[in-house]
Image: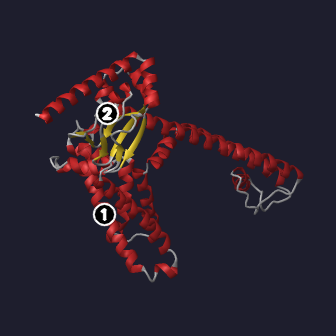
């Protein structure tokens, strides 16, 4: 990392997290902590017996937050040139395109109230609402949050259709209730717009009870509207839930596929073979210093390094495995114990393939068997060469 240009380092820390490095984790932790602290502060400031005595600490928290968020915004804008999809654009155009993305617009809204308050006379209630926009910055740091937003956006047409159906039902129910209750309650159901308040509350199953029918026909319509309201609510909820689950599955698939495609061992396989491997592979993350396996233990899985570095400690020598490296295939094929202790030199993401699954895949797919056996032979040759070199 020390050999990288500063702009590339900044981009990796802010947008890539350095593959889980301490720098990326620290920056993300500070920003997320400030976001939560700001939301809590805005809430507590509205309580007189808290907001008034602690006005000064709250003000300094605001100064600190705006400073950090401003630096973060400027750094993201400056380093956005390193974003691969924008690599072919001129720097100013890449930054303009980045500034117009939803995430950057939210980031801008989180700092604008402070500067607007310094330059203009702004309604404080409006400023408080904009300060609460900082909560939505969490979408950048929470995969689940961002996945939910993307799921809603992807189903915007279906949700729009649901809204149209709801509005149609709302008008029909309000019109029917106006006709049924107009004479009995002219102060509450005199017009269709008057009845729409009751219809909204009933169809959304809230039921405040401030307006209710008193005629037999009105009560019958109210019961039907309540049942219809359950259907109206279930429709968008089902759409969002299904889209969210599908988006999570697609994201996990893309992440795992990307990790496997970057590994030289699997790069030569056909997509169908990679897809078959993905069903059996699991991903695990280890912190620095963690022992992955010890010499003498049964070889129960083949391990591929997706991100980070591992230290492999043989009895007579040591070596390092970086991203794309693997070990354990030879021990699995020969059904021999591990001949080395493996530790995480830094935070690592590993792809693990259990012994039973590996043998089953090799039996069913000759291409996978050929790749693994060739890798085992190459590993054995490399170790023999390394042993001779260390002995010499």
- Is mark 2 in CB contact (under 8 Å) with mark 1? no
Q: Residue furthest bottom?
A: 53
Q: Residue furthest right?
A: 216
Please determine whether, in this image, residue 169 is positioned above or below residue 280: below
State whether residue 150 appears in this view: yes
Residue name at image x 45 percent, y 63 percent: 132
Q: How is the image coloured?
A: secondary structure
Secondary structure at badge 1 equals: helix
Query: Which of pointers 2 and 1 lies earlier in the amino acid sequence?
Result: 1
Q: Is residue 382 left or right of residue 349?
A: left
- Give the residue at mark 1: 68
* Picture quadrant of residue 190: bottom right
Instruction: State the residue in front, 105 or 47.
Output: 47
Question: What is the quadrant of the C terminus in the image?
Answer: top left
Question: Could you tell me residue 21's position as x and y percent?
Answer: 30, 51
* Picture quadrant of residue 305: top left
- Give the residue at mark 2: 327
> Dot 1: within a 10 Å radius of its alpha carbon, few (fewer than 14), some, or many (20 or more) residues?
some
Residue name at image x 33 percent, y 44 percent: 348
Instruction: State the residue in front, 163 or 306.
Output: 306
Instruction: State the residue in front, 217 or 79.
Output: 79
Q: Is residue 1 left or right of residue 232?
A: left
């Amino acid at each position: 990392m020390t050999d990288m240009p500063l702009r590339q380092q900044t981009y990796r820390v802010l947008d890539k997290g350095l593959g889980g490095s301490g720098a990326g984790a620290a920056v993300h932790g500070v920003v997320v902590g400030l976001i939560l602290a700001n939301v809590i502060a805005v809430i507590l400031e509205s309580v007189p017996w808290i907001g008034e005595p602690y006005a000064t600490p709250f003000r300094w928290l605001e100064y600190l937050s705006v400073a950090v968020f401003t630096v973060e915004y400027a750094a993201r804008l400056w380093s956005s040139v390193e974003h691969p999809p924008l690599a072919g654009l001129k720097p100013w155009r890449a930054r303009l395109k980045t500034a117009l993305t939803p995430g950057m617009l939210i980031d801008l809204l989180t700092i604008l109230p402070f500067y607007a308050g310094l330059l203009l006379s702004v309604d404080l209630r409006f400023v408080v609402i904009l300060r609460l926009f900082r909560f939505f910055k969490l979408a950048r740091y929470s995969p689940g949050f961002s996945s939910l937003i993307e799921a809603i956006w992807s189903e915007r047409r279906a949700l729009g259709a649901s809204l149209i159906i709801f509005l149609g039902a709302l008008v029909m129910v309000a019109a029917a209730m106006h006709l049924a209750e107009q004479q009995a309650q002219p102060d509450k159901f005199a017009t269709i717009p008057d009845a729409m308040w009751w219809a909204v509350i009933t169809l959304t199953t809230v039921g405040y009870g401030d307006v209710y029918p008193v005629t037999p026909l009105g009560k019958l319509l109210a019961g039907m509207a309540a049942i219809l309201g359950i259907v109206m609510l279930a429709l968008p909820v089902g759409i969002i839930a299904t889209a969210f689950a599908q988006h999570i599955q697609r994201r996990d698939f893309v992440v795992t596929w990307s990790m496997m495609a970057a590994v030289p061992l699997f790069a030569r396989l056909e997509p169908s073979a990679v897809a078959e491997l993905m069903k059996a592979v699991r991903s695990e993350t280890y912190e620095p210093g963690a022992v992955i396996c010890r010499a003498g233990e049964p070889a129960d899985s083949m391990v591929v390094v997706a991100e980070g570095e591992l230290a492999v400690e043989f009895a007579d020598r040591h070596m390092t495995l970086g991203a794309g490296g693997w070990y354990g295939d030879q021990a699995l094929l020969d059904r021999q114990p591990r001949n080395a202790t493996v530790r995480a030199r830094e935070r690592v993401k590993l792809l693990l393939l259990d012994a039973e699954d590996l043998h089953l895949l090799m039996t069913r797919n000759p291409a996978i068997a050929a790749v693994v056996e060739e890798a085992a032979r190459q590993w054995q040759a490399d170790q023999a060469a390394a042993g001779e070199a260390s002995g010499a």
